[in-house]
Image (cartoon, rainbow, N blue to C red):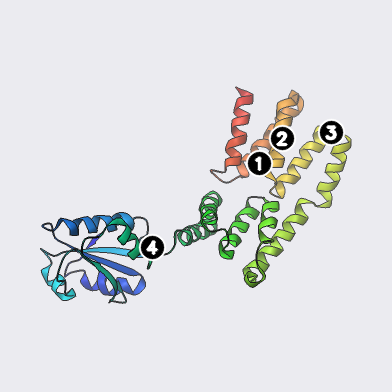
Amino acid sequence: MIAITLDNFQQMVVEESKSKLVLVTFWAQQVPESVELRDKLAAKLSGLTDHITLATVDCQSQEQIAQQFGIQGLPTAILLKDGQPLDGISGPQDDASIAIFLEKHLPKPEDVLLGQAKIALANGQLVEAKTAINQAYQIDNSRADIKLVLIEVYLQAGKTAEAKALIDTIMMVDQNSDYQVLLAKVELAEQAENSPEIQALETQLKATPDDINLSQQLATQYSQVNRHEDALTILFRLVQAGDESTKDKSKELFLGVLKSLPDGEPLAAKFRRKLYTLMY
């Protein structure tokens, strides 16, 4: 909360409200309901400072500001945009009425999560992006913009099958330029996952399943096309069953794949536990 005074009135009430909403709540210590409204608004708006600024006016010490707003009773809260009143509430408020008031002006939870996922992707934070966009998708699994970001996350995580299944659900009306770019990425990922080199190695390994060198080559190819789980599964089996002459290289490859995964990736934690169990 930002306390409004004559010194910062111009900046907070006028300038700040040109770039985002400013909610001004008026309170006085001798009016408990106004203090309660102030604190409830602060709790409701926690984490939403990118969208709305909560400002407070102590009507005892800032009587001039309260008069300028024409405040006639407490509790009162006024929502400002471009320096002008947009909406407001007055009188005692329960949680439900506060929620109804705020919902008219705040972004939906899935929009906040979508924005967080996009920022995380732009910053190379795949795990954070995955968490946020999955939550957004759970709230609304019909929105194309949410699906498109989730498809990008799937592609970066090497989950081409999931990306393909989801992109097939995009309706024609939503097949914009972003969709076309992702469709091309999905097709390229599918081709890479089933490249002639991988197919040849799979065929050879099927004929000679005990060939450690072929297994290591196939795991390396899988890793290069983001099929990390397939690569780790092969390499863990080699570390688990191999003799001393081959185990070191398999372990080196195994640790290399783990190192390439983003921090916090559940797949990495899963296979680190498996390796730890094997070693100790």
Q: CA distance from mark 3 to mark 2?
A: 13 Å
Is residue 59 visible to the viewer in this orientation of the structure? Answer: yes
Q: Which residue is mark 1?
A: 257
Q: Which mark is residue 125?
A: none
Say whether residue 88 is left or right of residue 255.
left
Give the distance between the C-alpha atoms of the residues marked 3 and 1, in whole angstroms: 22 Å
Give residue 63's position: percent from left, percent from top: 11, 69
**Callout 4: SS:** loop
Residue reaching furthest to the top: 280
**Pointer 3 with pointer 2, Cβ within 8 A:** no
Q: Secondary structure at mark 1?
A: helix
- Separation of residues labelled 3 and 4 (CA atoms): 56 Å
**Contact (CB < 8 A) between labels 1 and 2?**
yes
Query: From the viewer's perspective, is the residue at label 3 or at label 1 nearer?
Result: 3
User: Mark 4 or 2 closer to N-term?
Assistant: 4
Disc 2 residue crowd, few under 14, some 14–19, many 20+, Cα 10 Å: many
Q: Give the side of residue 67 with respect to residue 11, left or right.
A: left
Is the residue marked by circle 1 packed among few (<14), some (14-19), or many (20+) residues within 10 Å?
A: many
Q: Between 99 and 272, which is closer to the camera in this rendering?
A: 99
- Which amino acid type is shown beneath numbered disc 4? Asp
Q: Amino acid at mark 2?
A: Leu
Q: Which image quadrant: the N terminus? A: bottom left
Mark toward the viewer: 4 or 2 = 4
Q: Residue at x 24, y 55 (%)?
A: 39
Answer with mark 1 or mark 2, whichever residue precedes in sequence. 2
| Measured Cα–Cα span from mark 1 to mark 2 | 9 Å
**Where residue 235 is drawn, which disc sits there?**
2
| Picture quadrant of residue 107 | bottom left
First in sequence: mark 3 vs mark 4: 4
How far is the residue under mark 4 from the one under mark 2? 45 Å
Could you tell me how far apart the alpha carbons at marks 1 and 4 are, in whole angstroms?
37 Å
Residue pointed to by mark 3: 209
